[in-house]
Amino acid sequence: MNIDRFKHEHEQILEGIAALRDLSHDGIAENAAEIAHRIVAMSSVIKLHLSAEDRVLYPELQASGDRTLALLGWQFQQEMSSIAAAYVDFARRWNTPERVQCDPAGFRADANRVLRAVHERMQRENRDFYPLIERHAAPARQQAA
């Protein structure tokens, strides 16, 4: 199973979170338009990523024949549902410059909570989940060669 696409999307999302952090440090109200724009752009990547995980990654893991991998995939999918819901609410709340500009403290608190959860989750996937998938896929690639 090739997960390069998922890894690349993680890079894009992590870059988006870093950009939002930098913009926030430089002044939330002053950068409200760019912050809202970045949230909308990042939301597109996140929605695409989550959809591909649900349509491709998790079903392939379930069908892999590896019980450990299938269970871990199921656990990651279940955990992601609450994180995804929190992100959708965050993006809906802060997707316009006016909303960001009117409540910088609320944006900061919400961003710290939600984006930290997204960031931590992707780091766990990069560190624990994706390497396991790649180790599982390596023997299958060797057999096909």
Image (cartoon, rainbow, N blue to C red):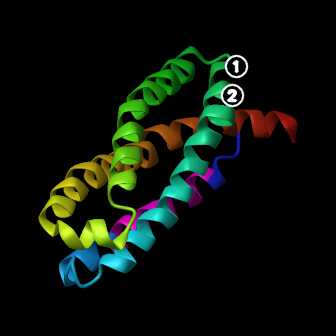
x and y, in percent, of residue 100 in the image = 27, 68
* Of residues 74 and 90, the one drawn nearer to the viewer in this rendering: 90
Label 1's element?
loop
Note whether 10 is above or below 96 in the view shown.
Answer: above
- Magenta range is 6-19
Q: Callout 1, which amino acid?
A: Ala
- What's the distance in space between the residues labelled 2 and 1, CA to CA? 5 Å
Residue 7 picture quarter: bottom right
Disc 2 crowd rating (10 Å Cα; few below 14, some 14-19, many 20+) is some
Specify the label residue 63 is tagged with: 1
**Nearer to us in this view, 2 or 99:** 99
The tag on residue 90 is none
The structure residue drawn at horizontal position 63% and vertical position 20%, both measured from the top left corner, is: 62
Rendered location of residue 92, percent (x, y)? 39, 52
Residue at position x 21%, y 54% in the image: 110
Q: Main secondary structure of the magenta part?
A: helix
Q: Is residue 9 magenta?
A: yes
Q: Quadrant of residue 17?
A: bottom left
Q: Position of residue 117 (x, y in %)?
A: 29, 46
Q: Relative to 28, does residue 58 appear above or below in the rendering?
A: above
Which mark, residue 60?
2
Residue at 44% over, 30% down: 76
- Residue type at tag 2: Glu
Question: In this orientation, which residue lies closer to the viewer: 61 or 35?
Answer: 35
View extreme (left): residue? 105
Q: Are marks 2 and 1 in contact (CB under 8 Å)?
A: yes
Instruction: Say which quadrant the C terminus sits in.
Output: top right
Residue 134 can be seen, yes or no: no
